[in-house]
Amino acid sequence: MANNKNCDRISNLPDSLLCHILSFLETKETVATSTLSTRWKPLWTLVTNLDFVDECEWWSSSDEEHSPNQHQDQTDQWNKCYRFAQIISKVWDLRHANPLKQFRLYWRCRCDPIHVYKWLRATIVCHLEELDLNIYPNLAFNLPTNLFNYCKTLVVLKLGGNIVLNPPSSSSSLGFPSLKILHLHSVNYANHDSFLILLSFCPILQDLSMETNVSLFWDPKYLFKIFVPTLKRLHLDMPKILSIPPDDINAPTLEINTPALEYLNFRGYLDEDVLVENLSNLVEAVLHIDDDLIVLGNKITNFLMALSNVKSLTLGSFTTECLCCTSNFDPPIFHNLAFLDFGVGPGEWQQAFLANGATIIGKWNVLPLLLQRAPNLEVLVFDMEKRNCSNVSNKKSSASTLEWLFEEVPICLSLHLTAFHIKGYKGSKDELELVKYILEWARVLKTMTVSFCSLNLEKKFRAFQEISMLPKQSTTCKIAFTD
């Protein structure tokens, strides 16, 4: 009995199962298991993934100026980075060219490109399936050309940092015939057509995530054309450049033509030259436009026209603020739309509109129009969490405004809406009137969720009483209150 209690059952598991368990650990933890016993000593060399993340901290000239021991601190940083490189090289030597499927390297501080070149060349011959490289050398790192020719088994490629993509333009290049997931985070492109060439190397690509490097906006010839017939998920993050006006010809052009796309997430600056088409299979779209220019309202409206088939639509707070400013907002009819997340902008934006002479109608006119154009909507989220809750107005004028805006009850509200969630509830008259209107006309509503925005206990109780006393059209509706 005593022997059974002390029996090491884990060590008796087959090598394949133990290696699978070890694959969920970082490499430094995997190597540490070699000290457990003779049985465990060689196992880490059989694990098919290597995962290295440096522990060095970012170091800048300003840090050196304010550090009391700047010379010693800098020396310690150099020593850490040197040991990091030595450890990885030693691990490569001890693995004895065993098969490798995944290689992940995050090297942020004092990255040595010579070592990175050496390790990448070693991975190319290992039938690698996943490569995750996020490095920041002082000089831009050019990916080895061999990577584009001999990685036929690569399924996942994630690149980030100070990396230059320069795929060969020769048609004889093998490319990535197995690649399904491609993530590009602030990388650089050697030529104006490098991005297009890279996509042409990925005949079965399904997932593309890209954050553009801000330096690209200084070149007038950069074109981002995404013509991928197999693509199903697309995440684009295009940061705003304050130094360049929105109508400047130097902004890059974006074109999206992806007939198989099911998910689109766009965040950032919406340039004039954006062409979105052939999205007949799109299921979910998320738009977070990070710009407050009034002229963007019409651009976003044009963007929405290409998204008319979506089933789920999320509009960020700045996006809806731009739509509120458009001269003639005329959205398409969303026949398939079942879920709408409508963001409301910061309180200071609303105050600015009022200060400029606009009425409160400017804040609410977009939502009724969208509801009118979404006849089959089932779930509505009214998200006010991004605004400044302390600036919420309690003016009484909103009641008549809402009645005027909702001259005709939207079909979705009376026939299909089953769930309504209002986030960031502060108890203003505007909010209470919206809740009242939903409860009054939503005949099949099943759940209403009210999430408070930093309210004290007394105000929460008052809001609870006000909402609970409102009449409900639906006899099955349940109201929940959350923080």
Image: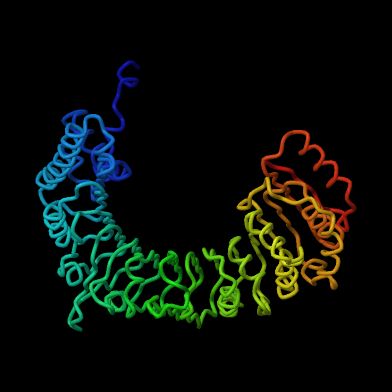
Q: Residue at x 14, y 61 (%)?
A: 125
x then y, percent, for residue 385: 63, 51
- Is 292 or 378 nearer to us in this picture? 292
In the image, is 235 to the left or to the right of 283?
left
Q: Residue at x 85, y 69 (%)?
A: 404
Q: Is residue 237 visible?
A: no
Q: Residue at x 74, y 33 (%)?
A: 457
Q: Quadrant of residue 380?
A: bottom right
x then y, percent, for residue 423: 68, 51
- Is 356 or 321 nearer to us in this picture? 356
Q: How many marks?
A: 0
In the image, is 138 to the left or to the right of 158?
left
Image height of 8 relative to 201, above or below:
above
- Is 379 or 388 nearer to us in this picture? 388
x then y, percent, for residue 369: 73, 73
Q: Quadrant of residue 360?
A: bottom right
x then y, percent, for residue 71: 17, 34
Say which quadrant the C terminus sits in: top right
Say which quadrant the N terminus sits in: top left
Identify the colour scheme used.
rainbow
Q: Residue furthest top?
A: 2
